[in-house]
């Protein structure tokens, strides 16, 4: 007969997790989380695509996805200044991307390769200036462009060149720091070998260094294009006339008044406007991860 003491001293059975429960704890939750993230990311895109095909042009009529398929909103874009805004946006964004890449590369190369008086102070100053929010500079930019416009009209208000210059000035510091680490990862022996062979600094920069830093050039160009494409406040301040507006400014006017908001037109314009960024991203995606990770390493 088993006594109470023997029962108390008997080893307790420890429940070990089954193979299925262990798989759920270690692996399955990741799939659940991935499905939730994909749904949150994809639903707005699907909703906008569905709204662009809705003939009613209101959000209430788009509650059922793809219940109404019509090209009315896309056809109506031709009756507006939408395609003019597309051209303006591409001009500003391409000029900003190319200018930001070249200016950032030149500045990063100078800080990385040359030792001159004030180098460390300049780097610190760029870092400190980037800490201030851009909203602080809006009034100064507005007053500066008014003053410049009185002397050089091409650099005053309502000028796309002036808007590009403002974008380039705002992005120079961040781009320089982003590219500075990448340039430091390029061995200086390459420069020295080119110098022995008689190459100038310009030849070394354009023919040897620039091909080696292609990933960070692609990243900076993509970031410059996207930031200019989505900017609204600066573009709204600088560009006054509708003929010079960018897409962000022009399309905002369609939905700024809730009583007469043209959501269908806005959705159709947004779908088309996303294509340039999508194409550019797909073309440069192989450089993005390498460029960002290498550029973040302090040299």
Image: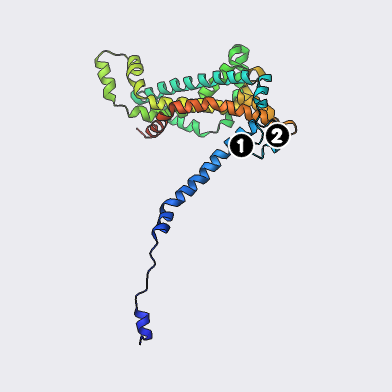
Q: Is residue 181 visible?
A: yes
Vertical order, 278 against 148 (above or below): below
- Left or right of 31: which side holds 73? right
For the point 37% across and 74% down, the residue is: 12
Quadrant in which residue 145 is drawn = top right
Vertical order, 161 against 220 (above or below): above
Q: Which sits in the foreground, 288 or 8?
A: 8
Query: Marks 1 and 2: in contact by CB < 8 Å?
Result: no
According to the image, label 2 marks what residue? 58
- Left or right of 67: which side holds 27? left
Looking at the picture, how far across and down is residue 284, in whole percent? Answer: 43, 27
Q: Which sits in the foreground, 292 or 278?
A: 278
* Disc sitting over residue 47 in the figure: 1
Which structural element holds mark 2? Answer: loop
Quadrant in which residue 134 is drawn = top right
Which structural element holds mark 1? Answer: helix
Tell me which numbered mark, 2 or 1, is placed earlier along the sequence.
1
Label 1 environment density (alpha carbons within 10 Å; few <14, some 14–19, many ≥20)? some
Looking at the picture, how far across and down is residue 57, in whole percent? Answer: 70, 31
For the view shown, which residue lies furthest in the bottom direction? 1
For the point 45% across and 48% down, the residue is: 30
Looking at the picture, how far across and down is residue 164, in whole percent? Answer: 54, 20
For the point 52% across and 27% down, the residue is: 277
Looking at the picture, how far across and down is residue 264, in whole percent? Answer: 67, 30
Q: Is residue 224 visible?
A: no
For the point 70% across and 37% down, the residue is: 61
- Left or right of 97: which side holds 207? left
Quadrant in which residue 54 is drawn = top right
């Amino acid at each position: 007969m088993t006594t109470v003491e023997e029962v108390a001293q008997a080893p307790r059975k420890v429940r070990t997790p089954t193979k299925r429960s262990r798989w759920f704890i270690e692996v399955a939750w990741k799939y659940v989380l991935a499905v939730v993230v994909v749904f949150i990311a994809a639903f707005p895109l699907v909703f906008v695509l569905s709204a662009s095909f809705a003939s009613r042009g209101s959000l209430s009529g788009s509650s059922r996805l793809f219940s109404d398929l019509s090209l009315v909103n896309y056809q109506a874009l031709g009756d507006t200044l939408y395609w003019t805004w597309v051209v303006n946006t591409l001009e500003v964004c391409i000029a900003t991307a190319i200018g930001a890449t070249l200016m950032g590369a030149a500045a990063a190369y100078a800080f990385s390769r040359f030792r001159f008086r004030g180098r460390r102070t300049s780097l610190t100053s760029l870092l400190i200036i980037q800490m201030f929010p851009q909203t602080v500079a809006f009034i100064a930019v507005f007053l500066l462009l008014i003053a410049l416009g009185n002397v050089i009209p091409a650099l005053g208000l309502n000028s796309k060149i002036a808007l590009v210059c403002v974008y380039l000035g705002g992005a120079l510091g961040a781009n320089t720091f982003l590219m500075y680490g990448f340039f430091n990862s390029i061995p200086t022996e390459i420069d020295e070998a080119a110098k022995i062979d008689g190459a100038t600094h310009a030849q070394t920069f354009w023919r040897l260094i620039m091909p080696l830093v292609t990933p960070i050039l692609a990243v900076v160009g993509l970031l410059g294009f996207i930031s200019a494409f989505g900017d609204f406040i600066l573009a709204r301040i600088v560009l006054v006339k509708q003929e010079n507006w960018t897409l962000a400014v022009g399309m905002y006017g369609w939905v700024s008044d809730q009583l007469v908001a043209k959501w269908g037109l806005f959705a159709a314009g947004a779908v088309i406007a996303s294509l340039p960024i999508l194409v550019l991203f797909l073309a440069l995606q192989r450089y993005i991860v390498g460029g960002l990770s290498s550029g973040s390493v302090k040299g």
